[in-house]
């Protein structure tokens, strides 16, 4: 379960913010794993990159140049 709550920012600020709360629930995680195993949920993995590329990938994401999930490996 997760909940987002808007955060009030100063007037005129270019920032958008939300307060995000997630609850760890092993039964929800198990249900999600079952859906993935059954093929009902698919994760779009775009690339596997070395952890040393983290800053570059972050910049790409900020510029909307990424799609899907990127897995970082040591």
Image (cartoon, rainbow, N blue to C red):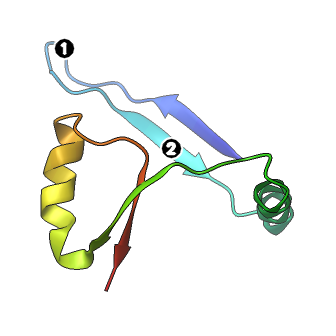
Mark found first going from the N terminus, 2 or 1: 1
Select label 2 or label 1 by which is in front. 2
- Which residue in the structure is indicated by mark 2? 20
Residue 34 lies, in percent from the top left, at 85, 61
How busy is the neighbourhood of tag 1: few (under 14 within 10 Å), some, or many (20 plus)? few
Label 1, secondary structure: give it.
loop
Name the residue rendered at 21%, 66% in the picture: 54
- Which residue in the structure is indicated by mark 1? 11
- Position of 16 relative to 56 (above/below): above
Whether tag 2 and tag 1 are in contact, CB under 8 A, the answer is: no
Residue 4 lies, in percent from the top left, at 54, 35
> From the viewer's perspective, is 13 left or right of 39?
left
Q: Quadrant of residue 65?
A: top left
- Position of 32 relative to 4 (above/below): below
> From the viewer's perspective, is 15 left or right of 45?
left
- Position of 72 relative to 55 (above/below): below
Name the residue rendered at 20%, 56% in the picture: 57
Camera-side residue of 1 and 55: 55
- Position of 42 relative to 31 (above/below): above
Distance CA(mark 2)–CA(mark 1): 21 Å
Q: How many marks?
A: 2
The residue sitting at the top extreme is: 12
Name the residue rendered at 19%, 14% in the picture: 11
Work out which quarter of the rendered image holds the C terminus and state it.
bottom left
Name the residue rendered at 29%, 42% in the picture: 66
How busy is the neighbourhood of tag 2: few (under 14 within 10 Å), some, or many (20 plus)? few
Camera-side residue of 62 and 22: 62
Label 2, secondary structure: give it.
strand
Camera-side residue of 72 and 26: 72
**Disc number at residue 71?**
none
> From the viewer's perspective, is 29 left or right of 46?
right
Residue 43 lies, in percent from the top left, at 59, 51
């Amino acid at each position: 379960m997760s909940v987002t709550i808007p955060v009030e920012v100063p007037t005129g600020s270019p920032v958008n913010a939300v307060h995000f709360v997630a609850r760890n629930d092993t039964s929800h995680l198990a249900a999600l794993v079952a859906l993935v195993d059954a093929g009902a949920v698919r994760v779009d993995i775009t690339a596997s990159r070395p952890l040393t590329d983290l800053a570059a990938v972050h910049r790409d994401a900020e510029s909307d140049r990424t799609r899907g999930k990127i897995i970082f490996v040591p």
